Each structure stands twice: as C-alpha cells, then as structure tokens.
Amino acid sequence: MKSKFLTLIAIGLITIMSGCTTVDNRDPLEGINRGVYKFNDVSDKAVFKPIAGAYKAVMPSPVRSGVNNFFANLKTFVTSINQVLQFKFNKAAESAGRFVINSTVGIAGLFDVASKQGIPQYKEDFGQTLGYWGVGNGAYLVIPFLGPSTLRDGAGFIAEAYTVDPIGYIDDPRTRNIVLGTKFIDARAELLPGSDLLDEAALDPYSFMRDAYLQRRANQVADGEVTKTNDGFEADDSLKSK
C-alpha cells in the first residue's frame, strides 16, 4: 500500500512537471534519451527481436492471433475506463459491450467475435485522458525496454498499471511476469516489419521515432483532429481545445 501511495505521489509530480515543458523544447533530455535509445536498440537486436522472430516462426498463425486478441481484449477494458473519464459515454458503452462479448462468446478474448458483429474497436489510455483534460506532453522520454514516451504518458502508464490494467491484479508474481513477458513478445512480433523499415529509411532513427511518436500522440489525443502550428508541425496537446 505504501509503495502504491508513493507511486501516486510521483505520478502527480510528473504530471505537474509535464506542463512546464514548452512546445519549442520537447526534448530537453536528448542526451540521456539517446543513450537509452541506443541501449534499447542493442538489447532489441541482440535479444528481443530474435525471440520475437522465433515466436512468429514457431507459433501457428491461429495461436498468435488468439494471443493478440486476448491482450487486445484486455486493452478494450482499459479503453472503456478512459473513455468514461473523457466523458465519451457512447464510445465507452461500445467498448464495454465489445469487452463483454469477446470475454464470453469469444472465450476470454481469444476470438474477436465483436469485430464480426461490426462493433468498432477504440484505443484510449490514461496518457490520452490526461492530454484530453489539458495536461501537456512534458519532456520527451525514452523508457528502458519500452521505448518512446513523454513525462505525461509515462505517468499515465504507471497509473494504468496500478489501477485499471487487469494484468496488474494477478496476485502470483511469476504468473504476472509470464503474462507481461508474453504480451511484450507478442507486441514486438507485430512490429517486426516496421523496425526493419525504420533502420533502412531514417538517417537518424532516434529523431524520426521521436517526431513520429509525438505527432501520433497529438493525433490520438485530438481524435484525429490535429491542430497545426505555423511551421506545419502539430501543436502541443495542452494547446488544443478539448
């Protein structure tokens, strides 16, 4: 309980700090971030990418699809909570219905029955919720093993993991770690084609990934209606109207 309380205090401080970073200084931690990015890149190429490749090669497509559907279904539950927090009640009802259908008829989410019934799939997280209510990105941040983020999104990730993510409620640490590891490898396997393209196309993969991440998050927070600044780049989330 004490550790969770301290975590929530840390989240509050990070969220406050997120509003202190200006639009023109989104990457004040670039020196540190580039070091972490290099560490992640080396670790990925040496360990995680080969494991993800082996996973994709060995596991039959239906099994991989079932695993991916399972984790996507858990994400739908998290999405519905965030949609309620953003007062998107109609979409929250759709996401909740999708979760119930896939969790029951779809056998714990292994089968995406809801999509076949035409129920839309949304993705919302607590970082987007904070952005919706005007909390700025804060400094760009590269997290070890997890990759690109911001102070706001990092705080949102921690808050989500401790509060609404069903995986966080698995009591047995060994089982929880196995589930988290499987989720990580499944997500990495889905990104295999894109990682090769990034290495080949970008002169500076770090800058490319940073700019792409920030633009994508701005788009997600604004539900696709991104405000442009005079120089053609997306404005900071905190400058957009809700």
Image (cartoon, helix red, strand yellow):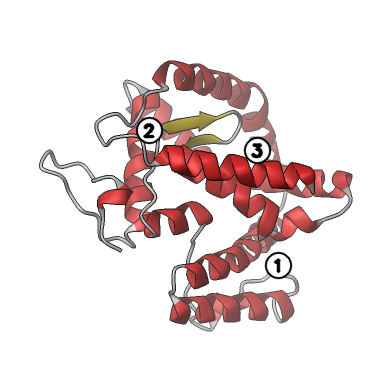
Q: Label 2's element?
A: helix
Q: Which of marks 1 and 3 is nearer the N terminus?
A: 3
Residue at 40% from the left image edge and 21% from the top image edge: 30
Structural crowding at the residue carrying mark 2, measured as other residues with C-alpha within 10 Å and reported as few (<14), some (14–19) or many (≥20):
many
Residue at 58% from the left image edge and 67% from the top image edge: 76
Q: Are marks 1 and 3 in contact (CB under 8 Å)?
A: no
Distance between the alpha carbons at the discs numbered 2 and 1: 33 Å
Say above or below: 124 vs 119: above
**From this viewpoint, is residue 56 visible?**
no
* Relative side of 238 to 109, left or right: left
Question: Measured from the top left, where is residue 242 in percent x and y?
Answer: 30, 64
Q: Residue 52 carries which label?
A: 3
Q: Which of marks 3 and 2 is nearer the N terminus?
A: 3
Distance between the alpha carbons at the discs numbered 1 and 3: 20 Å
* Relative side of 122 to 181, left or right: left
| Front in this rendered view, residue 191 or 34 | 34
Structural crowding at the residue carrying mark 1, measured as other residues with C-alpha within 10 Å and reported as few (<14), some (14–19) or many (≥20):
many
Distance between the alpha carbons at the discs numbered 3 and 2: 23 Å
Residue at 87% from the left image edge and 44% from the top image edge: 174
Residue 48, quarter of picture: top right
The type of residue carrying mark 1 is: Leu
Question: Measured from the top left, where is residue 103 in percent x and y?
Answer: 71, 75
Give the total of numbered labels.
3
Q: Residue 110 carries which label?
A: 1
Residue at 60% from the left image edge and 39% from the top image edge: 10
Q: Which of marks 2 and 1 is nearer the N terminus?
A: 1
* Relative side of 102 to 226, left or right: right
Q: Mark 2 points at which residue?
A: 210
* Relative side of 115 to 209, left or right: right
The type of residue carrying mark 2 is: Arg
